[in-house]
Amino acid sequence: MYQGIRISGFGGQGVISAGVLLAQAGLEEKKEVSFFPAYGAEMRGGTANCSVVVSSEEVAAPIVSEPDTAIVLNEPSLAKFEPMVRPGGLLIVNTSLINSKPTRKDIKVLNVPCNEIAAELGNGKVMNMVALGAFAAATGAVSIEAIAKALPKVYKKLKPEVIELNVQALKKGAGFKLN
Amino acid sequence: MAEKKLWKGNEALAEGAIRAGCRFFAGYPITPQNEVPEYMSWRLPQVGGAFLQSESEVAAINTVYGAGATGVRCMTSSSSPGISLKQEGISYAAGADLPIFIGNVMRGGPGLGNIAGGQGDYWQATRGGGHGDYRCFVMAPNCVNEMANFPHKCYEVSFKYRIPSMVLADGIIGQMMEPVEFKYPEVDVKTLKEPEWALGKCEGRNKRIVKSYDLKEGGVEIMVNERVKRYDQIEANEVMYEEKQLEDADIVMVAYGTSSRIAAAAMKIAREKGLKVGLFRPITLWPFPKVRLTELAKRVKKFVAVEMSLGQMVEDVQLAINGRADVYLHAKPGASIITAEEVAKTLESISKKEAKEYAAVK
Amino acid sequence: MQLLNKRPESLLDVKMHYCPGCGHGIIHRLVAEVMDELGIRGRTIGVAPVGCAVFADTYFNCDMIQGPHGRGPAEATGIKRAKPDTIVFSYQGDGDLASIGMGEIVHAAIRSENITVIFVNNAIYGMTGGQMAPTTLIGQKATTCVDGRTAKQAGYPIKMSEMLATIDGATYIERTTVHTNPGVIKTKAAIKKAFQNQVDGKGFSLVEILSMCPTNWGTRLDNPSEATKFVQEGMLPVFPLGVYKDACAADKK
């Protein structure tokens, strides 16, 4: 299997940490992984994005130029990454913050109101976990269990109850299914 | 096998150096290598080493020149413009036969360029870079795991042959995270023998001098020729490369570092289309694996250099092939992202005989 | 028969290349005598500059390093921090320290690097053949200001001791001269203090020493007093002697 992913959103939405978490989850499942963040000046404009590859074989290109899945968490990210998705690929759209509708007909679209779900859980910060949960369920690239196992390794300072909240968010996200 | 952990490239380079015995670091901030000095600043004191944030790259390389003269395993790191500033010091270290270790996490250039990952410093790294006749041992990692493990080899070669060594990475490898396994046992610096040239306490022995000059007629010629013998040994003993799917290949891509990763992805695309494409990856850029390329040219008749520069390594490929086969170039300067899809297109055009050779008149 | 004065052990019996009337030979000997007297020769590492004193690595009887122009304080920093139990000195001229190496000397002082710097100021580039130095006096002739330095074209001579004394990290800064016998005696005392400070771990010490360059000043080589007169009448008014900073003395008060 091979899954090339782009995650994009505002700084503070947990784009980078979601990417690291995904790579760590792949590692938990003994897969080959790579994570590459947009860095420096690219970060200064307030948007952040990263490339993650999870694969059963050695990872070739670490920068994902034609993602199998793009997870877009804000409006500018939709405009930037929708055109890049591989035909037949998946676009996960955070409908809480994105009003525009994807225009392409040759890709699958999964709408997830990430911020609303996170707010229901009582902590807006876990909105990135809602998106990851939806991704894991829709693609099967990594399991929810692997992400949950990766959580304390990536967030070394988080209290157990906060980790638990993140796991709940993952599970909520996993409930969103493609039509 | 130890459990693999995710490491960021720059931090893996720093930790790899420490595990290989590095106990001194001086550097100056520059993107995209800042994680190296940041990591060193807290990690070196834990192992009894010294860290210094210098006032400039020039000061940093010369501080390392001083520390290196005492025989300690030392390091400086920077990115392209900063490495340019260090060139005088690197030339002196080469001229004084000091085994210092340098990390270059390349960005776009020339000038201030940009901070994305590029490969425009190949000439600088492999041709010496500073003034005078000299070489540096240059290794090009293409993954974070190699960032972690190449410092060990660099120190080994540096101290054995008394030559500066360099890891030539780029912003992509520096910034990305991948699983790492530290292959070598951690070097216990207490077991390292003090080199017979190292400065220190001259009580009870003859004084030692570390210098790169000799103003007597013919003096420098003698120094350089003595060094050339060691360079010859390095060319004979320390060449490293990797080969992928060369057995049936009609076209062989030659690529190092990040480009070799992109080339590997392009190879997959091309092979799915029925093209017999292979990949040859120089791991040491100096010494360049020219003997092996010459051998390959007996059978393979088309080589294509894939580089994130305007075409620098291609000259070494051309020199090694020396007319025995056709050499092509897929170049992308300015630290722009090179994609597997565009490289695959170049491979197709070469196979259809549409592409022009590198040496063809433009 | 009693030997009253001998060559210091810290200075090797080799022929120096310095010109007649040059101050470097005197200053080398003073540094060597101090190393002998403090008993530090066996653990001292010297840093030779680029300039007339480039061959200092062959004269001093201790481990020596020679590196790029102006970077002596950076090299000394690396040596001292890698081997903190050694005594490290950087020997530099005015072009080396006050022009191309301005950044390194200032930042070594800022860090209060525990090293000793011997700064020889003769107001000219000697090794390269008499070009204008950052310390060349207004009106002084040099091969790159043949009618004499003008402030309009080249600015003013830099007063390093005064400037370095403003830095918090500087422990001890003194300017002396070797153009007179009392000056030589005071210079030795200053050098000794600058090394003693390092032995005691007190931080950055620098002695600026005014010195003669008869060859490049164009004074008569058969009449050394012409050169000493230039120090007396030309340099002293611009570069007044004295202790500019003594943090240790201030501590005692």
Image: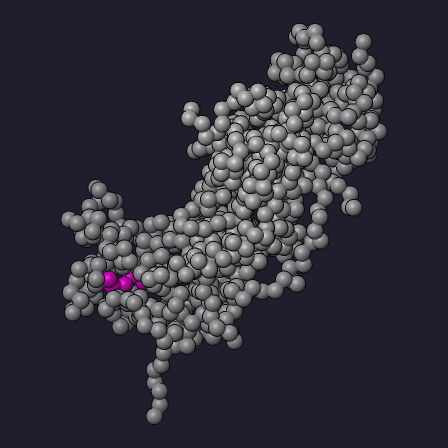
Q: Nearer the viewer, residue B311 or C245?
A: B311
Q: Nearer the viewer, residue A139 or C44?
A: A139
> In terms of image quadrants, where is residue C237?
bottom left
Above-or-below relation of C210 to B138 = below
Quadrant into which the C terminus of chain A falls: top right
Quadrant into which the N terminus of chain A falls: top right
Q: Position of residue B7 (x, y in %)?
A: 68, 39
Above-or-below relation of B100 to A32 = below
Residue found at x 67% / y 16%: A85
Span colored in magenta:
C209-213
Residue found at x 47% / y 67%: B208
Q: Position of residue B156 (x, y in %)?
A: 61, 54
Residue A167 lies left or right of residue A17; in this view the side is right
For this orientation, the residue located farthest to the bottom is C1
Residue B138 lies left or right of residue A2; in this view the side is left
Can residue A44 be seen? no
Q: Position of residue B272 (x, y in %)?
A: 69, 22
> In terms of image quadrants, where is residue C185?
bottom left
Above-or-below relation of B181 to C80 = above
